Image: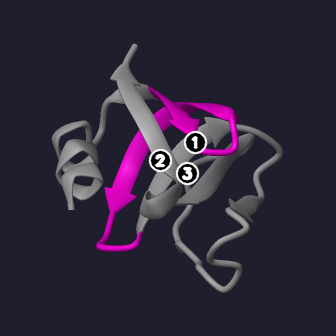
Amino acid sequence: MEAYYNCLHCKNKRVRILTTDGKKHEGIIVDVDRNNVYLKTKGNGRMKTSAFYPGSYYGGYYGYGSEILTLSLFTLLAIALI
């Protein structure tokens, strides 16, 4: 639950997220629910999902070149405002 509230606090802000598998992600948190955080990143306009919740989907249009990355809250190790 702590990860959920931390992500809510950082919603609509630019963050760097470190996951338990050692990957770093940067972007803007556009939404968060009880299982996932949705991160708007620079990309090719496609949506990506973390390996832990392959069926997750976050709909919406965020402009050409944007990507919505879905990360499981269970995989978050650290989150920092940048």
In front: label 1 or label 3: 1
In front: label 2 or label 3: 2
Secondary element type, mark 3: loop
- What is the span of residues highlighted in magenta in the rendered image? 16-35
* Alpha-carbon span between mark 1 and mark 3: 24 Å
Label whose residue precedes the other's in the sequence (2 or 1)? 1
Residue 64 in which image quadrant: top right
Q: Pick the quarter of the image with the N terminus.
A: bottom left
Inspect the magenta stretch and tell me whether residue 20 lies in it. yes
Label whose residue precedes the other's in the sequence (2 or 3)? 3
Task: Name the residue located 42 percent from the left edge and 33 percent from the top edge.
Answer: 78
Q: Residues within 10 Å of mark 3 (few under 14, many from 20)?
A: few
Secondary element type, mark 1: strand
Percent position (x, y) of residue 65?
A: 74, 40
Q: Nearer the viewer, residue 21 or 29?
A: 21
Percent position (x, y) of residue 43?
A: 77, 39
Task: Name the residue located 31 percent from the left edge and 70 percent from the top edge.
Answer: 33
Q: Which residue is mark 1?
A: 19
In the image, farthest residue toward the top: 82
Q: Nearer the viewer, residue 73 or 20?
A: 20
Q: Are marks 2 and 1 in contact (CB under 8 Å)?
A: yes
In the image, farthest residue toward the bottom: 55
Q: Nearer the viewer, residue 51 or 47?
A: 51
Task: Name the residue located 53 percent from the left edge and 72 percent from the top edge.
Answer: 58
Q: Which mark is residue 49?
A: none
Q: Which residue is mark 2?
A: 76
Q: Residues within 10 Å of mark 1 (few under 14, many from 20)?
A: some
Amino acid type of the residue that numbered disc 3 sits on in the rendered structure = Tyr
Q: Are marks 1 and 3 in contact (CB under 8 Å)?
A: no
Label whose residue precedes the other's in the sequence (1 or 3)? 1
